[in-house]
């Protein structure tokens, strides 16, 4: 399996500092920032700094340290943003759209953290 990464995508430009973002958390391997078009009171995007198109690309080719860091950042953010499932917080939904059928808009791997209100059923038709 091979994955083609387009380094002109918006998130690559954000990582290069060419486009501003509202950073929530940054580590050596991972960046988290506010979605420009929030769909819920909490809507944060988490991206690896490496050049990965989709989650399956990341899972296949990222180093263990990148995957560990990304996973820990998502967990820390859920707590920091008040959408954990611990401490009586209300919980959250993680979404990672991939490819054509996943209706992925930006071809740099990202996970949406959504929460702060009831999010309804997972999928709607169409
Ligand atoms: P998707 O690829 O469909 O999972 O969604 C991409 C998301 O990225 C979408 O919710 C809007 C957001 N987005 C697009 N362009 C920008 C941008 O320039 N800055 C920020 N912060 N978010 C963006």
Image: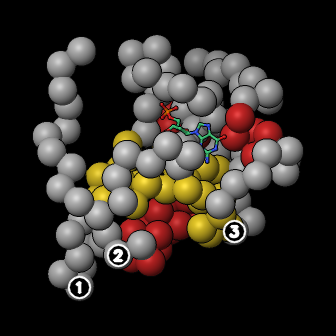
Can you say whether 86 is above or below 58 in the image? Answer: below
Distance, label 1 to label 2, CA atoms, is 9 Å
Distance, label 1 to label 3, CA atoms, is 25 Å
Which residue was labeled with disc 2?
A: 82
Can you say whether 117 is above or below 79 in the image? Answer: above
Mark number, residue 87: 1
For mark 2, does the 10 Å Cα neighbourhood hold few (<14), some (14 to 19), or many (20 or more) residues? some
Q: Is residue 60 left or right of residue 121?
A: right
Q: Describe the element under mark 2 as helix, strand or loop.
A: loop
For mark 3, does the 10 Å Cα neighbourhood hold few (<14), some (14 to 19), or many (20 or more) residues? few
Q: Is residue 112 left or right of residue 40?
A: right
Image spot of residue 28 (x, y percent): 74, 66
Q: Residue at x 64, y 50 (%)?
A: 48
Distance, label 3 to label 2, CA atoms, is 20 Å
CB at disc 3 and ligand 1 closer than 8 Å = no
Which quarter of the image is occupied by the N terminus?
A: top right
Mark number, residue 119: none
For mark 1, does the 10 Å Cα neighbourhood hold few (<14), some (14 to 19), or many (20 or more) residues? few
Q: Is residue 7 left or right of residue 53?
A: right
Which residue was labeled with disc 3?
A: 27
């Amino acid at each position: 399996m091979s994955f083609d990464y387009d380094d002109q995508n918006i998130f690559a430009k954000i990582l290069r500092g060419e486009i501003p973002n509202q950073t929530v958390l940054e580590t050596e391997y991972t960046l988290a920032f506010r979605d420009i078009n929030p769909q819920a009171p909490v809507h944060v995007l988490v991206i690896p700094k490496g050049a990965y198109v989709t989650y399956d690309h990341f899972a296949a080719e990222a180093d263990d340290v990148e995957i560990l860091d990304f996973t820990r950042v998502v967990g820390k953010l859920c707590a920091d943003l008040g959408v954990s499932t611990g401490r009586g917080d209300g919980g959250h939904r993680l979404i990672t759209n991939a490819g054509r059928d996943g209706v992925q808009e930006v071809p740099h791997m990202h996970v949406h953290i959504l929460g702060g209100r009831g999010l309804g059923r997972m999928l709607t038709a169409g």
